[in-house]
Amino acid sequence: MFVDRREFLATALAASIPTFGLELGRSHAEEIQTGKLSIAPFQFDATPPIGHSCCGGWIPNISVVDDTLEALGFVILGAGQPLVVCAIDWTGLLNSSHLQFRQALAEGAGTTADRVAVHCVHQHNAPMACSDAEKLVAAQGDLPHILDLEFFARLRERGRTAVAAAIAKARPLTHIATGQARVDRVASNRRVSRDEQGRIKSMRGSACKDPALIALPEGTIDPFLKTIAWYSGETQVVACHYYATHPMSYYGDGRATSDFAGLARKQRQAEDPGCLHVYFTGCAGNVSAGKYNDGSKEARPLLTQRVYEGIVASEKELQPRPLTHVAWRTQELLPVARKTFDASQIEQALADRSQPVVNRNRPAYTLAWIRRVEARLPILVSSLLLNDQAALLHLPAECFIEYQLRAQSLAPQRFVATAAYGDGGPWYIPVKEEYPNGGYEVGVAFCEPEVDDQLTTAMQGLLASS
């Protein structure tokens, strides 16, 4: 379903995307002493139509909208070509769909796709967009769609229009501030039940009712919710909030919702309508609320309140400082697909009509990744460095929490806020030490363990001091 590399590059160049995909491993760093900066917040509705699939098509389709799904972000002007950062209340944007979404926002901003970072919050009662997998599924003739391509095209146009309209109302950008606070009883590691050899015995998922699993320690998490705020003079214009946990209380009931992470953001937004509040999910591939969430309807408002309280507490630390220096950095990487993958067997599984839907459409995502790797179409990761003070780090897929903690150790002099769930093509990205230990996350990781070294090297370059 992917075009070959030469055709892709020709298309990219025709679309004025000069730095994406020219050479594997290519990095780009742009250091700018800022002059007159401005910032343009934007938001638009990303709620899919009734009947749209959720989470890749293996849970019930949307039948009710409990609260809207949104795309929110900002454009920075005056630091070279415009820079765009966006979060969307979707499960995932994968492969070509991630690039297409970035292209649309880039066109609205008058910039290039390599200067756009888009991240999903990863709620599950929401779309998981992979146009490449959708084409594979549609070719079977009997499988339900996983993505409404016409709706996705309309959404991209909506985003393009919203960004262009926001730029017309851009405000001077003068200061930034950072703050963090512990979040009480939300995040817990999913991979805490192990045998004597360290192998995973059972997983503490997004919700858990097993008393033995609940009793186990939180495990490795990042307990802090981090906030980076942007100011025009004394006025706070945008506040970006970062926290690492799977953001689901309960799902699979056909009710579209931004769930507890999105609801906490919306609660803060309602109190502070003059500032756009944006929420990013960090490296939560092995982190969920399972220790503190039994999956009941009563749990959702409790988790919402705890995240909201973390947002408010983090904002109490904000002390604006002049923004004088900006650096935008990118790095391309193309991990190797799992050597155990057999494309012909995966194609057979996709076509096996005796199997349930989940056993057929999941292979479409695997096959889409294999074909992307064969076409040598890289993932783009990026960072936005602000003074010597802070860094926004943009990572792909479902990275394990260890990458987020590692990023902070790589730049201890900076306040590092990490957003994962960018390009979701690789699915889960465990650290290499966890591959031998098995478990669900390793079982649905599309890359070889060498991805750890590749991603760590990329992070070193993205966060290095000037």
Image (tube, rainbow, N blue to C red):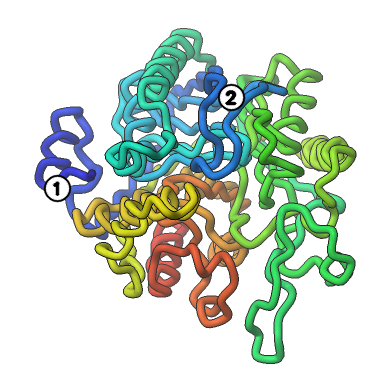
Q: Is residue 121 above or below residue 425?
A: above
Q: Is residue 224 visible?
A: yes
Q: What's under tag 1, amino acid-wise?
A: Asp
Q: Is residue 142 left or right of residue 421?
A: left
At mark 2, the secondary structure is strand
Q: What's under tag 2, amino acid-wise?
A: Glu
How crowded is the residue under tag 2: few (<14 C-alpha within 10 Å), some, or many (20+)? some
Picture disc at residue 4: 1
Q: Is residue 239 visible?
A: no
Residue beneath the point at 35% across and 44% down: 133
Q: Can you tell which quarter of the image residue 150 is in?
A: top left
Q: Position of residue 362 (x, y in %)?
A: 44, 52
Picture disc at residue 70: 2
Q: Position of residue 285 (x, y in %)?
A: 59, 58
Quadrant occupied by the N terminus? top left
Q: Can you tell which quarter of the image residue 406 is in?
A: bottom right
Marks 1/2 in contact by CB < 8 Å: the verdict is: no
Q: Is residue 406 above or below residue 375?
A: below
Quadrant occupied by the C terminus? bottom left
Residue beneath the point at 41% across and 72% down: 453
Q: Is residue 368 left or right of residue 299?
A: left
* The one of 262 and 407 positioned closer to us in this rendering: 262
Q: Is residue 61 left or right of residue 222?
A: left
